[in-house]
C-alpha cells in the first residue's frame, strides 16, 4: 500500500540489495535469499516522524540513542527528525556530525537533526546556520523554547530565507506559554497555572507577519487549538510557504485525560478542550494540517513521577504512531490510504523538501513512499492485532505515556511486525 500513488494491491514485493526491484509483478528470474511471509498484513512505506527526541548528546552513558532508534523501528519509523534541545544544544557542527555518525553506525532508523535557531536556544544570538547545514541539519528550530525578542526572530527569518533554510517553530508565546495546563474550568478547579489559546494564536500571527516580510519557509510543530487551525488555514490560502503537524497526544486526548493530576498527561503543548481536539482531527483530514507526529520525548522516571506541576513534560510515543494514525482513520471513517498518508508520504514530502534545499536529492531516497527503483524503507503492519500498551514492553527507555492501558483503559488496534531500512531487516517480532 502506498498513499502517494494510491497503490493498494495484493502481491509480492521484491528487494534487490537496498532497492525495491518490483511491486506485485516479480521478475521470474528473481531468487530470494530471504522471504518474509506478510499474508493478511500491510506492506507500507517506512514511516516518517518529524518529532522524535533521542536524548543524545546528553545521555550517551545510558545508551539512549540506541534504545530510541530501536523504539523508532519498532514503531515502523524508518526516518525521523530530532529537535535540537539536547545537552549540549545542537548549535555546533561537531555535535551534529557526531550524532549523525553514531546514528549511522547503529544501522537502525535514518536520523535527520534540526539545528538550534539561536545559540543555546536562548533566543539572543543566531546560530551558524550555514555550518550546521553542512554538518547535516535539515532545518532550524527552537524546540519548545520561544524567541521573545521579535527583532531576533526577524533576523533569523531573513537569514534563513536568503539561503533557503526551513525554520521549524512550536507556536507559543514566551510569556503566556509558561503554564502547565490549558486554560479552562478544569485547570481552574485543579489550581494549575494555565496556557491560554492566545499563547498559540499570538505567536502564529507574529510568525505569519514575519513570513510575509521575509519570505521565509516555516514548519509549525505541534499545533494544539481550533483557533490555531483556523489561522493556519487562512495563511495557507494566502499562499504562505507553510506546513504544520499535530501530535498523537493532541489528536486523541483532551484536558479530561489529566485525571487526578496524572503526570503522564503533563505535555507540551498542554491537552486542550474537546472542541480543539475535534478541530485538529478535522484539520488533519482536510489537509490544513500536513502530518501526524509522535512527539516522542522519553522523560526519565525520576523526572516524571513528581507532582503534576513539577513533572517534566513529555511522553514516549514513537512506537504508537502508526496504531494511533490507524485509529484516527477508523474513527473519522476515512480509507486506509488517507489515514496512512499523514505518517508516510506527507511528512516524507516535508523532509525531502528540506533536504532538497541543501543538497542534490538522492533519486533513490523517497521517504514515505513505495516505488520501484527507490530505497527499500518499509514496515509490515498487522491491522488486526489488538494489543495493550504496557510500559515494560516498550523498547524506549521512556516508559511514561498517557496511552498506557492502565491509564487509558483502551487497547490499540494494529501493530508493526517488521521494519526494513535500506533493504535490511532491522526489526522483527
Image (tube, grey):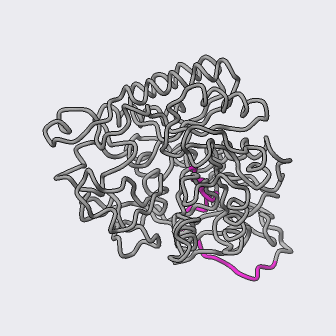
- Side of 41 relative to 354 (left or right): left
From the viewer's perspective, is 189 left or right of 300?
A: left
Q: Nearer the viewer, residue 115 or 375?
A: 115
Q: Who's the residue at 61% across and 56% down the image?
A: 80
- Residue at the left extreme? 189
Instruction: Tell me where residue 28 appears, x and y as whole percent.
Output: 83, 72
Task: Residue 34: say if magenta.
Answer: yes
Horizontal side of 387 relative to 381 (left or right) equals: left
Image height check: is 233 above or below 427? above
Can the viewer see residue 41 in this picture?
no
Q: How many numbered discs sit on the rendered protein?
A: 0
The answer, for residue 272, to whether it is visible in the render is yes
Span of residues in magenta? 31-50
Give the x, y percent position of residue 382.
49, 65
Q: Residue at x 27, y 36 (%)?
A: 194
Extreme-bottom residue of the structure: 33
Q: Is residue 222 left or right of residue 185?
A: right
Residue 154 is situated, as x and y percent measured from the top left of the image, at: 63, 26
Quarter holding residue 90? bottom right
Residue 344 vs 168, above or below: the answer is: below
Q: Residue furthest front?
A: 124
Which residue is painted at 69% across and 62% down in the image? 377
Q: Main secondary structure of the magenta part?
A: loop
Query: Which image quarter holds the N terminus?
Result: bottom right
Residue 165 within the segment the image draws in magenta: no
Residue 352 x, y percent position in the rendering: 72, 46
* Residue found 42% across the figure and 71% down from its top: 394
Amino acid at each position: 500500500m502506498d498513499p502517494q500513488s494510491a497503490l493498494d494491491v495484493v502481491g509480492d514485493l521484491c528487494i534487490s540489495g537496498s532497492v525495491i526491484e518490483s511491486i506485485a509483478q516479480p521478475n521470474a528470474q528473481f531468487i530470494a535469499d530471504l522471504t518474509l511471509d506478510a499474508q493478511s498484513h500491510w506492506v507500507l512505506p517506512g514511516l516518517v516522524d518529524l518529532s522524535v527526541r533521542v536524548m543524545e548528546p546528553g545521555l550517551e552513558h545510558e545508551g539512549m540513542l540506541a534504545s530510541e532508534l530501536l523504539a523508532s523501528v519498532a514503531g515502523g519509523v524508518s526516518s525521523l527528525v530530532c529537535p535540537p534541545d539536547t545537552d549540549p544544544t545542537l548549535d555546533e557542527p561537531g555535535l551534529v556530525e557526531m550524532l549523525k555518525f553514531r546514528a549511522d553506525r547503529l544501522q537502525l532508523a535514518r536520523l535527520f537533526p534540526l539545528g538550534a535557531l539561536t545559540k543555546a536556544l536562548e533566543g539572543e544570538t543566531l546560530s551558524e546556520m550555514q555550518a550546521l547545514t553542512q554538518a547535516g541539519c535539515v532545518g532550524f528550530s527552537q524546540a519548545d523554547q520561544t524567541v521573545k525578542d521579535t527583532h531576533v526572530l526577524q533576523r533569523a527569518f531573513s537569514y534563513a530565507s536568503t539561503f533557503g533554510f526551513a525554520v521549524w517553530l512550536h507556536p507559543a508565546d514566551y510569556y503566556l506559554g509558561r503554564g502547565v495546563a490549558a486554560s479552562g474550568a478544569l485547570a481552574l478547579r485543579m489550581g494549575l497555572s494555565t496556557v491560554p489559546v492566545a499563547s498559540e494564536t499570538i505567536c502564529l500571527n507574529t510568525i505569519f507577519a514575519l513570513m510575509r516580510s521575509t519570505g521565509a519557509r516555516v514548519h509549525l510543530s505541534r499545533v494544539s487549538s481550533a483557533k490555531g487551525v483556523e489561522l493556519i488555514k487562512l495563511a495557507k490560502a494566502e499562499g504562505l510557504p507553510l506546513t504544520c503537524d499535530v501530535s498523537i497526544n493532541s489528536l486523541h486526548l483532551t484536558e479530561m485525560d489529566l485525571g487526578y493530576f496524572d503526570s503522564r498527561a503533563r505535555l507540551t503543548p498542554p491537552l486542550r478542550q474537546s472542541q480543539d481536539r475535534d478541530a485538529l482531527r478535522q484539520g488533519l483530514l482536510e489537509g490544513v494540517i500536513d502530518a501526524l507526529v509522535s512527539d516522542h520525548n522519553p522523560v526519565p522516571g525520576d523526572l516524571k513521577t513528581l507532582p503534576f506541576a513539577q513533572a517534566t513534560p513529555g511522553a514516549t510515543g514513537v512506537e504508537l504512531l502508526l496504531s494511533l494514525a490507524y485509529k484516527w482513520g477508523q474513527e473519522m471513517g476515512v480509507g486506509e490510504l488517507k489515514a496512512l498518508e499523514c505518517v508516510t508520504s506527507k511528512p516524507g514530502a516535508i523532509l525531502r523538501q528540506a533536504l532538497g534545499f541543501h543538497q542534490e536529492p538522492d533519486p533513490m531516497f523517497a521517504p514515505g513512499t513505495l516505488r520501484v527503483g527507490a530505497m527499500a524503507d518499509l514496515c509490515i503492519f498487522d491491522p488486526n492485532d489488538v494489543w495493550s500498551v504496557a510500559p515494560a514492553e516498550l523498547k524506549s527507555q521512556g516508559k511514561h505515556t498517557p496511552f498506557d492501558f492502565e491509564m487509558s483503559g483502551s487497547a490499540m488496534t494494529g501493530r508493526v511486525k517488521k521494519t526494513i531500512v535500506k533493504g535490511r531487516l532491522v526489526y522483527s517480532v
